[in-house]
Structure formats: C-alpha cells, structure tokens
Amino acid sequence: MKVGVFDSGIGGLTVVKSILEEKLFDEIIYYGDTARVPYGPKDKNTIISYSLEALEFFKNFDIDMLIVACNSVSAYAIEELQKNTTIPVVGVIDSGVMALKNTTEDKKSEILVIGTSATVNSNLYDHHLRELGYENITSIPTPLFVPIVEEGIFSGNLLEEAMKIYFKDVKKTDVVILGCTHFPLIENEISNFLNGVKTIHSGDAIVKVLKDTYHLTSTHETKISFFASSNPDNLKNVAKKWLNL
C-alpha cells in the first residue's frame, strides 16, 4: 500500500509520525504546500483550489489512498477531493470526532476545540459533536500557533504569550481537540498551560480509523519521501528531527 499525506505545511508530519509508528504502509509520499501556508485565513474556494492542485501532484505517484492531514482542507475540500479521484480520501475531522467518542462517553464533558480560523468557522467539529449528544463545546480559533510552529518554535515566551491571549477566558476543560495537525508539536505546552488537560490529536485518531475501517495491519518497513511547494530542505530537516529519521 502506498499512501499520500497532504498538509498545508509541516503540521501533517504529526500524522506521519503516528502512521510510521504503526508501520501501516509500505510507502508514504508527503506533500506540504509550504509556499501557501497557512490555509486557515483563506476562503473556502481558495482552499478547494489548492487541494485539487495537490491531488494532481499525487497522481504522479499512483497512490492507493490519500490522507488529508489538514483540518482546513478536511473542513472545506474533502467532498471535492473525493469527487475527483477513485481512491479513498481520509480526513482528520471525522477521525478526531471518533477519537473523542472513544475517549469520553460523558456528554456533559467540557470540550475545547482549537484550530485555524477556517476550521473553527466551518463549525464541523461543533456540528458533529452535538449530533453525538455532547453539550458543552467551546471553539476558539488559534491561528498564530501555525506560523509559530512553522518557524520551529515549540516552546518559550512567544508561545506562552499566544496561549495567554487565546486561553484567557477558558475556565474549565476536560478534553482539548487539537483541530490542526501543527498543534501536536506544541501539545505538551498546551496541556500544561491548561492544567494538564487531556488532548486529542489527528495522528492517533487517523491510525484508529485506518485500522478499524480499512483493516490495515503492520508492514515490515516503510519508505518515505518528502515534497514541498517551497523550501523542501526545511521540511526535510524538520521531518528528520520530529520523526527521528
């Protein structure tokens, strides 16, 4: 099995990390649209257009499945991607919702969803969670986290100040859904800032979907290649550090 993993930048590497740990594919082709990151502030039609361009890129590699490791794309472009290919296209929002359901059955849990402006404004997390009966959902756009992570800043004063701004009105939270694949890179800092709250991120959620829905099992070795629309060397360097390659 050969899989393509698509993200607006380096954040999708957090999904790749979970997939690599489980050895679910023989080959991974990663593409980050680093020339146009972040997608969060962009309008729906632009996100769809960029996503279809990425799909064309992956057609060069004869992949068996596409994983959309970007919440903004998952919010606005999944259906268009599925219409334009015959291979399975798996997004991160449905996976994250399923992961929350497996984490807590308490419908009165205080759930905090954080993500890009596009993801939060789509209301998809809120909609799906309320359909499942969860009542106490707060969604906060945290767009500055994306460029902070893209700059390789995973801790320190700048991140601390951004969290103070975004979380100043958060009083009680039982679970935080990290609604952007960049955010697991600062997962520990977010959790500690919010008093050790449990976090859910797309990588682990995707792995569960791949196992349960597509019945994928471990292979012996995974080959991985990295591509980017700008500064691919930076993407490869981050990947080596984050994925221990």
Image: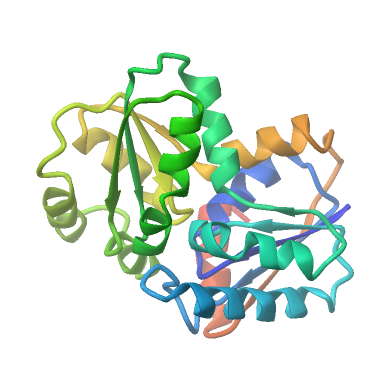
In the rendered structure, the answer to whether residue 177 lies left or right of residue 1 reads left
Image coordinates of residue 95 in percent, x first then y, are: 60, 40
Whether residue 9 can be seen here: yes
Compared with 187, 58 (above or below) is below
Compared with 235, 191 (above or below) is above
Residue at image coords 70%, 36%: 209
Residue at image coords 29%, 35%: 191
Figure quadrant of residue 224: bottom right
Residue at image coords 30%, 63%: 143
Taking depth in this image into account, of 240 and 185 the one nearest to the observer is: 185
Q: Quadrant of the C terminus?
A: bottom right
Taking depth in this image into account, of 245 and 136 the one nearest to the observer is: 136
In the rendered structure, the answer to whether residue 42 lies left or right of residue 208 reads left
In the rendered structure, the answer to whether residue 186 lies left or right of residue 9 reads left
- Check the image and name the residue furthest to the top: 106
Compared with 115, 137 (above or below) is above
Figure quadrant of residue 134: top left
Image coordinates of residue 228 in percent, x first then y, are: 60, 78
Image coordinates of residue 236 in percent, x first then y, are: 58, 70
Whether residue 29 can be seen here: no
Image coordinates of residue 63 in percent, x first then y, are: 85, 64
> How many numbered tags mark residues here?
0
In the rendered structure, the answer to whether residue 136 lies left or right of residue 133 reads left
Q: How is the image coloured?
A: rainbow
Compared with 233, 134 (above or below) is above
